Amino acid sequence: MLRLLLERLEARAAACRPVTVALAGAGRFGTSVAAQIAQIDGLRLAAVADPNAGNGVEALKAAGWAEGHWRRCEGAGEAHAAIEAGAAVLAPDAEVLESTPIDVLVEATGIPEVAARNAWGGLRQGRHVVMVTVEADVSCGWALAREARRQGVVYTLAAGDQPVAIMELFDWARALGLEIVAVGRGTRRYPADRHGDPERALARLGYDSEAAARLRLNAQMYNSFRDGSKAQIEMCAVSNMTGLPPDRRGMHEPSVGLNGLSDLFADVEAGGLLESTGVVDLANGVGADGESELAENIADGVWAVVTSADGHIREDMRIHGTRVSSDERRMALFREYHLCGIETPLSIAQAALLGSSSGMPQEAPTSEVLAYAKRDLRPGDRLDGSGGRLVYGLIDQAEVLAAEGILPLGLSFGARVREAVAADQPIPAGAVEVEVASIVARLRSMAGER
C-alpha cells in the first residue's frame, strides 16, 4: 500500500496538483500534522481553522507558509477567493471553509461537539474527513462513517495515533490468518491518577509552565491521559473498528512489561486473565507497587497477542524472535512507540488518493465509554467531560449502556446534573440534562442509538 501511495503522491506533485488539506484545530497535534504535511510532495495545507488566531498562525508557519502569504478570512466567500488566488486561509472556525476547494478535512479540535459538527459538515460537502478527535468518534463515529459511505467519501481515524497503530497490527495478523487473543495499547497510570484535576495534570506529567506554554498543551486533554479516560476512549475506538469487546468493564489493565504480555493476556484456563479471548485491553507500565515503572514496559506503544492453530507456525514465530508465552502457544507483537501527528498525512493521502480508510467504525458500535463521577456530584453541577474535574470514563459493551441507562462520556461535556451521584459511580442518563443543541446526541439518534 505504501508503494502505491508514494506513486500517487509523486504523480500529484509532478502534475502540480497537490491534495489540498484543511486543518480544524491547531494545538500541538494539529501543528505536528501541519509540519509533516510540509515534508511531503503531493500534499498542501491550504487552510487552518482555530478560534485562537495565534495557534493558527503557528500551524501555517509549520506548514511552510511565509507571513504575508495567508489571509485571515471571516466569511466563506473571501476564504474561497483566497485559496483560488493561491493563498492560505486562517479562519476562526471550519464553517468559514465550507465552500473552499478542499479535498480533506483533518479534525483535531479535541472537543466532541465541535468535532462532530465539523466532520458532519465536511462529509456533507463531499470532503474526506480524518478524525483526530477520538472522543467524537466513540460517541457518534458510526453515524459519521455511514454518512461518508452515503456521500462516496472516506471517514477515517488518524494514522500515528494508537487506535490506527493497533489496527495495523490487527490487520496484519488477520491477513495472515492468525487468531487474535487480545490487542491494546500501553498506559502509565498511577493509583491516584483516576481522580486527577486538569490544573495539576501537566506538572504531574513532567511539563513546567514554560514547556506547557511553548508546546501549547491542552491541560484537560493531558489530564484525560493521566486519569485513564483517553486510554478507555482509544480502546473503545479500536473495539468499534475491529468488533473486539472488552473482557470486562474498564478492561483489566494489568501491570505488565513486554515479556509478560503473552502470558497474562490468555484465557484463565491457560493461567491468564481473560474470561474470553478476542478482546481489547491495556498494559500498564507502572509496577504493581504503584510507584516504579516496569523495565521494558510498553507505556508509549501498542501491542497484540496472537496465536495460531498450526503448531508449525507457532514454532516459527518462536524461532524468528517473537516474545512467546511460557507454554509457547501465544506470541506478542508490538511497537514501542506511536507517532501521533507525524504519520497522520498517510491517512490524508490514503483517503484522497486510494479512497480507503486507515480505520473506521463498523455499522454499529461494539463498545461505549460510560461516564463515571470523579467526585460526589450535586444538582446544578455542570459536567466538564473527559479529562475534567468531575468525570472520567470506562469502556463496556454497547448494549450495557442502554440496558443500565448510563450516560455516554461523549454527552457529558456541558451536561447539567439534576440528581446527586456518588463518586466512582456510573452517571445515570436520567440524572443529567444534556445540551438541547447537542449534535452528538442528534447523530446518535439518527444512527439508531442502541
Image (tube, grey):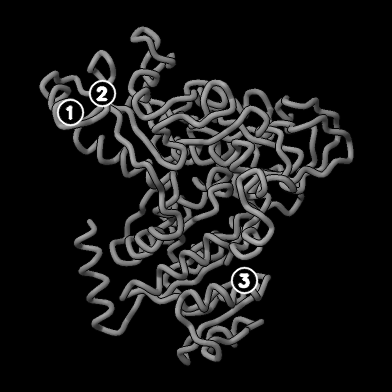
Q: Helix, strand, or loop for circle 3?
A: helix
Ranked by sequence position, the earlier of labels 1 and 2 is 1
Spatial CA span between label 1 and label 2: 8 Å
> Is any atom of residue 338 visible in this view?
yes
In percent of the image, x 33 and y 23: which residue is there?
262
Spatial CA span between label 2 and label 3: 46 Å
Query: Crowdedness of circle 3 by 10 Å Cα count: few (<14), some, many (20+)?
Result: many
Q: Helix, strand, or loop for circle 2?
A: strand
Q: Position of residue 10 (x, y in %)?
A: 23, 74
* Residue 55 disc label: 3
Closer to us: 88 or 330:
330
Kindly indicate whether the residue at mark 2 contacts the one at mark 1 (C-beta within 8 angstroms). Answer: yes
Q: Amino acid at mark 2?
A: Val
Q: Amino acid at mark 3?
A: Asn
Left/right of residue 192 with respect to residue 148 in the rendered view: right
Closer to us: 213 or 248:
213
Residue at image mark 2 = 324
- Label total for image: 3
Q: Position of residue 399 (x, y in %)?
A: 56, 27
Query: Crowdedness of circle 1 by 10 Å Cα count: few (<14), some, many (20+)?
Result: many
Q: Amino acid at mark 1?
A: Met
In terms of image quadrants, where is residue 270? top left
In percent of the image, x 89 and y 40: which residue is there?
380
Q: Residue furthest top?
A: 269
Residue 204, placed above or below residue 63: above
Ranked by sequence position, the earlier of labels 1 and 3 is 3
